[in-house]
Image (tube, helix red, strand yellow):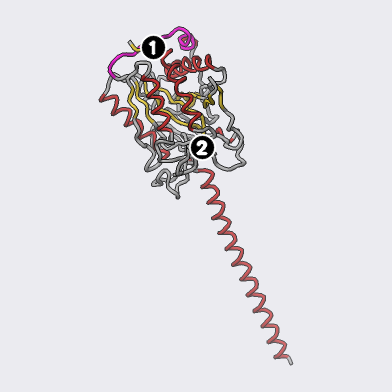
Amino acid sequence: MKNAGNGKCFQICVILMVTVLACIGQSMIDHFQGKGQVQAYNETILKLYPQEDEEEEPSGGQEAMLSLLVPKSGETAGSQDAQPVTADGDITDFLLPGVSEKDAKEDSDTKDNSSTKSPTAEYLKQIATRTYEISGETNILIYHTHATEAYRPDGEDTYKATGTSRTDNTDQNIIRVGEELKTQLEKYGFTVIHDTTNHEPPKLSTAYSRSVKTMEAYKEKYPDIDIFIDVHRDAANVETQQDDVVTIDGKRCARLMFVVGTGEGTNGGYNPRPNWEANYTLAKSITEQLDSINEKFTRDIRVKPGRYNQHITDMCLLVEVGHNANTLQEALNSMPHLAKSISQVVKKV
């Protein structure tokens, strides 16, 4: 009887040990699965707009937190593995239905890490008094640091997405908007080049390091280029901001915003830095012309510590044409007004 009792105890102990080991094993599986889910979720959230990172601008530091939001080295913009990003660092672009309007301003072209600098009184005075005159055979270069940015599909304006609010279809992305701006500017006598290079691959977060080479190449070939315009579209909460437009002559027009980089950086600054006050003065002068058409046509100019390749000349513009809650047609409708406003500020002689 004693041996039988010992055998039963042994069986019970074995069963308990197996049960405990099974529970531990399941906990480990759940842990790693959960970790994978969190990682996948974070990758979906954090890989949205690229920023001007240290690879692009070695002398200019970026916020440590933002450095975590950039796609890893070797990822190709628009691939299924690399989550898409929009205008220079956003972490919310067309992201999740519940994203807030505040969060939708997190892209690094428009994120609220704006510079504390403001133009001097001398430059502010120039906004009201300065006139710009340009001459030469080639006047303006339009280009796109982020060429696959797209709008909310609507009607016939649909596309095969290569990422969230992104497409390689140049008839449906920001390149189409740049082409319309070129057409409208030419009506005012400007000679315009529209570069359609896709600067995003192989790594979206370093697109500025490639677009600056495009700018420099054109400036070397056409030294009389005066104005460089980097055309983007911004990010927004698609659920709540579909009516973020102004109506002009019965047409819905996407609102516009200029971004000006000081080049001060966050850890020492860039070298060389832009003449940001000169760029601001030009952007502000055009903004005032746009607002004379409709007082809500523009959002406030965003002055930021990045550089955005605005050191190339004293007439560099980065314009956000609406956002991904707007439609392509709304963006196109704004281009005649932008071209007219530029022509009222800048005179070709």
Q: Please determine whether, in this image, residue 266 is positioned above or below residue 23.
A: above
Q: CA distance from mark 1 to mark 2?
A: 40 Å
Q: Please determine whether, in this image, residue 283 is positioned above or below residue 112.
A: above
Name the quadrant of the C terminus: top left
As helix, strand or loop, the secondary structure at mark 2 comes to loop
In the image shown, does 203 or 324 lie closer to the viewer? 324
- Residue 308 shows in this picture: no
As helix, strand or loop, the secondary structure at mark 1 comes to strand
In which quadrant of the rendered view does residue 279 lie? top left
Q: Which residue is mark 2?
A: 155
Q: Which numbered circle lies on residue 132?
A: 1
The extreme left residue here reads 221
Q: Which numbered circle lies on residue 289?
A: none
The amino acid type, in three-letter code, at marker 1 is Tyr
Of tags 1 and 2, which is closer to the observer?
A: 2
State which tag comes first along the sequence, 1 or 2. Answer: 1
Q: Please determine whether, in this image, residue 7 is positioned above or below residue 27.
A: below
The amino acid type, in three-letter code, at marker 2 is Gly
Which residue is rendered at x = 41% and y = 32% of the image?
Answer: 176
* Residue range of the region highlighted in magenta in the rendering: 123-137
Name the quadrant of the N terminus: bottom right
Please check the rendered image and state whether residue 207 is part of the magenta-colored stretch, yes or no. no
Residue 92 picture location, percent across and down? 54, 39
Which residue is rendered at x = 34% and y = 16% of the image?
Answer: 189
- Residue 201 shows in this picture: yes
The extreme bottom residue here reads 1
In the image shown, does 176 or 289 lie closer to the viewer? 176
Please check the rendered image and state whether residue 134 is part of the magenta-colored stretch, yes or no. yes
The extreme top residue here reads 129
Badge 1 local density, few (<14 within 10 Å), some, or many (20+)? Answer: some
